[in-house]
Image (spheres, helix red, strand yellow):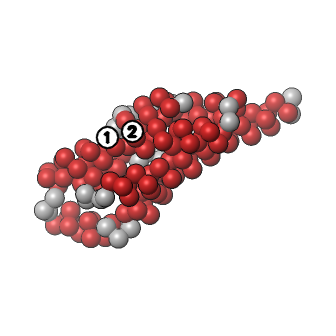
């Protein structure tokens, strides 16, 4: 489980079947423990995107578009990171953007850890209750 979530988040913009693994593992293992393990692995993997944004910010910073977007998103970065991390959508752009903004790493880790843990736990719970429902109805 740890490796599936880590691999899913380390690889930038390439989808992996980590959610399917989480769903299947939730059918047989404790979904709450899976959420904690998967959320921790996911936030560690997202450091790749953050680091790319941090190192690549020189490419985009300084332009008018960058400044306009930076001023709009600076106020809501934490809420946006949490939201994107909690939803089953690609997070890569948000992580890169946080790095490009030089968003504080401790805040990045906190918001993404909480969001990813909620997402992974939710997927594992759907697997658990889905399997229970399917096996109970046969």
For image coordinates 43% across by 44% down, the residue present is 43
Identify the secondary structure beneath mark 1.
Answer: helix
Q: Say whether residue 64 is visible.
A: yes
Asked if the residues shown at circle 2 and circle 1 are in contact, with their CB atoms under 8 angstroms apart, the answer is: yes
* Vertical relation: 95 (above or below) 13: below
Of the numbered discs in the image, which one, if any, rests on residue 4? none
Judge by depth and name the residue closer to the eye, 104 or 64: 104
Classed neighbour count for the residue bearing mark 2: other residues with Cα under 10 Å, few (<14), some (14–19), many (≥20): many
Where is residue 69? Give x, y as percent: 27, 65
Q: Which residue is mark 2?
A: 45
Q: Quadrant of the C terminus?
A: top right
Q: Say whether residue 8 is visible.
A: no
Where is residue 16? Give x, y as percent: 46, 31
Identify the secondary structure beneath mark 2.
Answer: helix
Quadrant of the image occupied by residue 20: top right
Classed neighbour count for the residue bearing mark 1: other residues with Cα under 10 Å, few (<14), some (14–19), many (≥20): some
Left or right: residue 46 compared with residue 102:
right
Where is residue 25? Give x, y as percent: 63, 30
For image coordinates 18% across by 47% down, the residue present is 56
Q: Quadrant of the N terminus?
A: top right
For image coordinates 35% across by 70% down, the residue present is 75
* Vertical relation: 65 (above or below) 136: below
Q: Which residue is mark 1?
A: 48
For image coordinates 25% across by 57% down, the residue present is 102
The number of numbered discs placed on residues in the rendered structure image is 2
Question: How much space separates mark 2 and mark 1, taking CA atoms?
Answer: 6 Å
Left or right: residue 8 compared with residue 47:
right
């Amino acid at each position: 489980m740890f490796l599936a979530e880590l691999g899913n988040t380390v690889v930038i913009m390439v989808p992996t079947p980590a959610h399917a693994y989480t769903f299947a593992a939730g059918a047989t293992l404790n979904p709450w423990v899976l959420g904690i393990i998967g959320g921790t692995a996911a936030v560690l993997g997202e450091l790749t995107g953050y680091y790319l944004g941090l190192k690549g910010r020189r490419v985009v910073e300084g332009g008018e578009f960058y400044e306009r977007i930076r001023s709009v998103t600076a106020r809501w970065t934490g809420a946006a990171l949490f939201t994107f991390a909690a939803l089953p959508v690609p997070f890569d752009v948000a992580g890169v953007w946080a790095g490009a903004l030089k968003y504080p790493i401790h805040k990045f880790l906190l918001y993404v850890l909480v969001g990813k843990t909620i997402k992974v736990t939710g997927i594992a719970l759907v697997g658990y209750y889905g399997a229970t429902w399917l096996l109970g109805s046969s």
